[in-house]
Structures are given as structure tokens and as C-alpha cells.
């Protein structure tokens, strides 16, 4: 049974001014040597094509892996969430969009807001950590989320059964 592909690597283990062979790279980054060979095919720079074993500078490994991570990122537009099921930026169903103000600070100016929705394609629940500034931006674009109350509110009715008859 195959496990899930590893997508992040600790590139700080590679010294930038040192040359590494493919087997050393595989050992340092805890991956298979075939993975490193595929990286070469995908654009990992080696020092000299005619020399065996192939050697790669540590800085080239770092740069290559950083570019791979950046190429996978998909920036979200206003009104979009990242759906973990679809693996794409998606909009929420408009009637199931909500904003929950947590009153936690995000720096000296802004407050944290949790934007919740449901994917319009697959129905997966979506969550986006955001700020009150972003909520205003969503409101300007006509995506006015409903505010959820996070605290308990009081009412005239008691939750205990005080009107029971005592015998």
C-alpha cells in the first residue's frame, strides 16, 4: 500500500556551499533516490553532466524545492476558500456563508474572523482564517456574510425547571 506523497522537505539540512550526490540528497531529505532522479528530469541543476556520480550544490536543492512549493500555491480571490476535497479554490454556497468574530487581535489594528462556508461543488465544509478588514472587502463585493454570535445570551426563561409542582 502506498502512503501519501511527501510534499515538504526540510531544506535547512542541505548546506548551500556543499555538493551532494543523489544518494546523499535522498538520505538527508528522507526520500527515495528515484525521487531525486525525477527532480533532475524536472529541472534540478547538476554540476557537470559528464561526471558520475551526479553532484548537486545545496543551494540549487533549496532553490529547486522552494520553486516547486511556490508553483503549487493557488492565490485566493475575494470570496474564495480553498476546498481540501477538490484541491482547488472554490466559492461557498451563498446561503451557507457565515463570519464568526473571535475578538482575538491580529496585530495592533485588526481582529481575527473565521469565515465559514460550504463548497458549491462537493459540499465540503470550508474554513478561512481572516481579519475584519477582509470581511469589509467581502461586503463591498456583495458577499455579505452573516455574523454568528459566539457568546451566550441571556433570556427571561430559566433553563431549570422551577415551575414543577412540589408534592
Image (tube, rainbow, N blue to C red):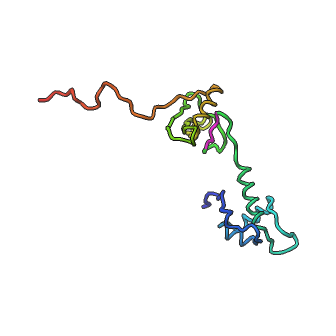
**Position of 150 compared to 137: left or right?**
left
Q: Position of residue 128 (x, y in %)?
A: 58, 40
Toward the viewer: 149 or 72? 149
Labels in figure, total: 0
- Identify the residue at the far right of this view: 50
Left-right relation of 108 to 149: right
Q: Quadrant for residue 55, please give it.
A: bottom right
The boundaries of the magenta stretch are 79-83
Give the camera-side residue of 40 and 47. Answer: 47
Locate the N terminus by quadrant: bottom right
Asked where in the image residue 15 lies, by quadrant, the reply is bottom right
State whether the magenta stretch is mostly helix, strand or loop.
Answer: strand
Q: Is residue 63 above or below residue 52?
A: above
Residue farthest to the left? 167
Identify which residue is drawn at 83% across, 75% down: 52
Quarter in which the C terminus is drawn? top left
Which residue occupies 34% across, 26% down? Answer: 155
Left or right side of 71 for 47: right
Is residue 82 part of the magenta span, yes or no? yes
Q: Residue at left 14%, top 29%?
A: 166
Query: Where is residue 24 drawn, in percent x and y?
Result: 71, 72
What is the x, y in percent for residue 133? Answer: 61, 34
Relative image position of residue 135 (x, y in whole percent):
59, 32
Left or right: 78 in relation to 155:
right
Amino acid at each position: 500500500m502506498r502512503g501519501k506523497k511527501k510534499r515538504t522537505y526540510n531544506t535547512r539540512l542541505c548546506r548551500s556551499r556543499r555538493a551532494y550526490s543523489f544518494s546523499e540528497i535522498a538520505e538527508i531529505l528522507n526520500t527515495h533516490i528515484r525521487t531525486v532522479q525525477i527532480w533532475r528530469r524536472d529541472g534540478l541543476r547538476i554540476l557537470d553532466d559528464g561526471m558520475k556520480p551526479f553532484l548537486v550544490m545545496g543551494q540549487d536543492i533549496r532553490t529547486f524545492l522552494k520553486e516547486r512549493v511556490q508553483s503549487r500555491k493557488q492565490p485566493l480571490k475575494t470570496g474564495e476558500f480553498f476546498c481540501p476535497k477538490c484541491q482547488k479554490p472554490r466559492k461557498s454556497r451563498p446561503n451557507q456563508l457565515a463570519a464568526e468574530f473571535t475578538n482575538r487581535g491580529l496585530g495592533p489594528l485588526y481582529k481575527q474572523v473565521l469565515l465559514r462556508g460550504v463548497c458549491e461543488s462537493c459540499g465540503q465544509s470550508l474554513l478561512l482564517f481572516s481579519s475584519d478588514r477582509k470581511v469589509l472587502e467581502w461586503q463591498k463585493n456583495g458577499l455579505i456574510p452573516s455574523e454568528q454570535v459566539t457568546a451566550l445570551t441571556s433570556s427571561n426563561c430559566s433553563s431549570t425547571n422551577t415551575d414543577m409542582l412540589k408534592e
